Image (tube, rainbow, N blue to C red):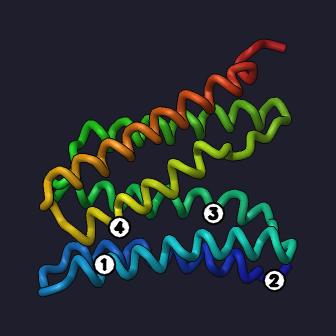
Amino acid sequence: MPMTTANKLTLLRVFLIPVFLVIAYLDFPGHRYVALGVFIVASLTDLLDGYIARHYNQISDFGKFADPLADKCLVMAALCWFVETGEMFGWILAIVLLREFAVSGMRLVAVEKGRVIAAGWSGKVKTASTMVCICLMMFFGPEPRWLNLVCQGVILVTTVYSGVEYFVKNWDVFQES
């Protein structure tokens, strides 16, 4: 089966992750803004590939696997960079990582039982708000401090809320048959 347009966009997002990181780590005037531009393009491929996949019936097993993985890798790359530059608390990143591993683990258990758990609205809100907050943090930098802290708070709250909701709605996956 040939590679769909949606899948090509997902692969572009994966390719843009190291490009984003290299630019973010380079120290030249305006590097944050160039990195921000790359991050925005990568984030927009997420919206576009989802729209194309649904609208043109290009949903594939590869897309089901690679799209959420590409999203997580893009976001985690940015959050790790913020932690390393001292612009984000490491414990917030740890909670984000814990949520992602826990949700992925629950999905594996569900698949073993022949059940697919689709992403809920709170997970989509978490992804979108996290990407917006990353953009704000990239654009403004560590100052103003209040904006940086608000963005970290939004990332933390949406991550915890969506994780708790995910487990509450799907806890029956852990019930023995």
Question: In the image, which is nearer the foreground, mark 4 or mark 2?
Answer: 4
Residue 96 spot, x, y in % from top left: 41, 41
* Count of numbered badges drawn on the protein: 4
For disc 2, the neighbor class at 10 Å (few under 14, some 14 to 19, many from 20) is few
* Numbered disc 4: secondary structure: helix
In the image, what residue occupies the spot 60% across and 34% down? 105
Q: Is residue 74 above or below residue 154?
A: below
* Numbered disc 2: secondary structure: loop
Q: Answer with mark 3 or mark 1, whichever residue precedes in sequence.
A: 1
Could you say which quadrant of the image residue 77 lies in? bottom left
Q: Which residue position holds label 1?
A: 35
Q: Which residue position holds label 3?
A: 67
Q: Amino acid at mark 3?
A: Asp
Q: Cβ–Cβ below 8 Å for labels 1 and 4?
A: no
Q: Which residue position holds label 4?
A: 135
Q: Which residue position holds label 2?
A: 2
What residue occupies the far bottom of the structure in this picture? Answer: 29
Q: Answer with mark 2 or mark 1, whichever residue precedes in sequence.
A: 2
Q: Amino acid at mark 1?
A: Ala
Residue 83 spot, x, y in % from top left: 22, 52
Quarter that holds the C terminus: top right
